[in-house]
Image (tube, rainbow, N blue to C red):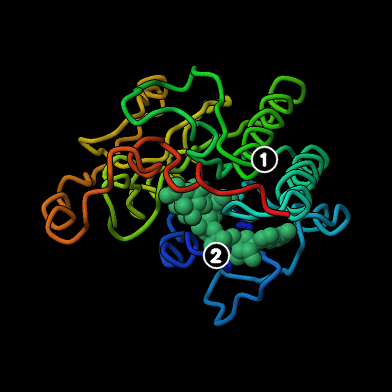
Amino acid sequence: MLEKLLITGAAGSIFKQTRDQYATIARSVRLSDVVEVTNLGEGEEFVPCDLSDQKAVEELVEGCDGILNLGGISTENTFKRILESNIVGIHNLYEAARKHGSPRIFMASSNHVVGYYRQDEHFDASVPHKPDGWYGISKSFGEAVALMYFNKFGIETAMVRIGSILPEPLDYRMLATWFAPEDFISLVKTIFEVPHLGCPVIYGISNNDAAWWDNSGVDYLGWKPKRNSAEFAEKIGANVPVPDKDDPVAVWQGGKFTADPVFE
Ligand code: NAI
Ligand code: 15L
């Protein structure tokens, strides 16, 4: 078990969905965000920090033996905002990790690294990146940073290309991309417990019948997601209109992100 797990982006959606699950992973958690996290429970502390502030990030990381990096811009946005939070931010995080004990890192990468593959293309972690916007590009950058810090300094990272974390899938695309919150937590636990991690890409999805991505390259981790979006297929069929076959949400793995403009 970790002594102190740093969780960035702790005011965000994923942490809110899983907040009560970290006691089996770490004795204490250091929660951080630019937005305050309130109602702190036992074993929780809050340290405000903007990831684009290098000095603040160095202080934030000191004393932590694991990092769950959820902080940053999580959808398409202006290049300037993505540059500060996701690109400068990831630089600052890895530099801080290098200077403070090389803790293992769970990086929230995204399916939008491969958003411009078609939904009828099925593949594993070895495919070239095809990001669907500046947000996806920033996650590609993050994966490159993680690999460099692994090869040069031995810092281990799980580069988790998360699909869609929600209590249940909401549309046809999410039958492939759904990642149940409990499967996310079991992956976090696995990442911080396995004796050898390395620096793998892992597709962050549940055990969905409709999945596009193959995680057999990380069988060595022994992680087995339990939920399957198929349990919601009938409900989606009854409630969600079938998109036109040429609609980006039905063509591309990145769905509606592929239809986003470049925001100025
Ligand atoms: P979210 O947008 O709800 O939360 C992100 C948090 O990061 C926010 O609370 C925000 O205040 C904080 N943040 C933004 N810029 C920051 C900065 N410069 N310094 C410090 N904190 C900053 O996102 P969510 O859904 O919780 O996702 C967490 C991570 O997982 C994100 O990196 C996102 O890109 C990634 N991800 C999430 C998916 C999902 O299904 N929720 C799917 C794929 C990736
Ligand atoms: C992401 O990367 C986003 O952070 C999240 O909000 C969802 O849109 C998700 O991808 C998705 O593709 O469903």
Horizontal placement of 248 versus 67: left or right?
left
Q: Mark 1 points at which residue?
A: 138
Where residue 125 sits: x, y (%)? Answer: 47, 22
**The furthest residue to the bottom:** 39
Where residue 74 sits: x, y (%)? Answer: 58, 54
Element at label 1: helix
Which three-letter amino acid code belongs to the residue tagged 2? Gly
Where residue 84 sits: x, y (%)? Answer: 78, 52
Residue 27 visible in the displayed image: no
* Residue at 74% in and 52% down: 61
Do the numbered discs 1 and 2 sit on residues whose CB atoms are within 8 Å? no
Which three-letter amino acid code belongs to the residue tagged 1? Ser
Residue 55 visible in the displayed image: yes
Q: Name the residue under label 2.
A: 12
* Residue at 66% in and 72% down: 35
As rendered, which of 223 and 12 lies closer to the eye? 12
In the rendered image, the vertical position of residue 90 relative to residue 159, given as above or below? below
Q: Say if disc 2 is inside 8 Å of ligand 1.
A: yes
Tell me how many marks there are: 2
* Residue at 35% in and 23% down: 121
In the rendered image, the vertical position of residue 216 relative to residue 110, given as above or below? above
Element at label 2: loop
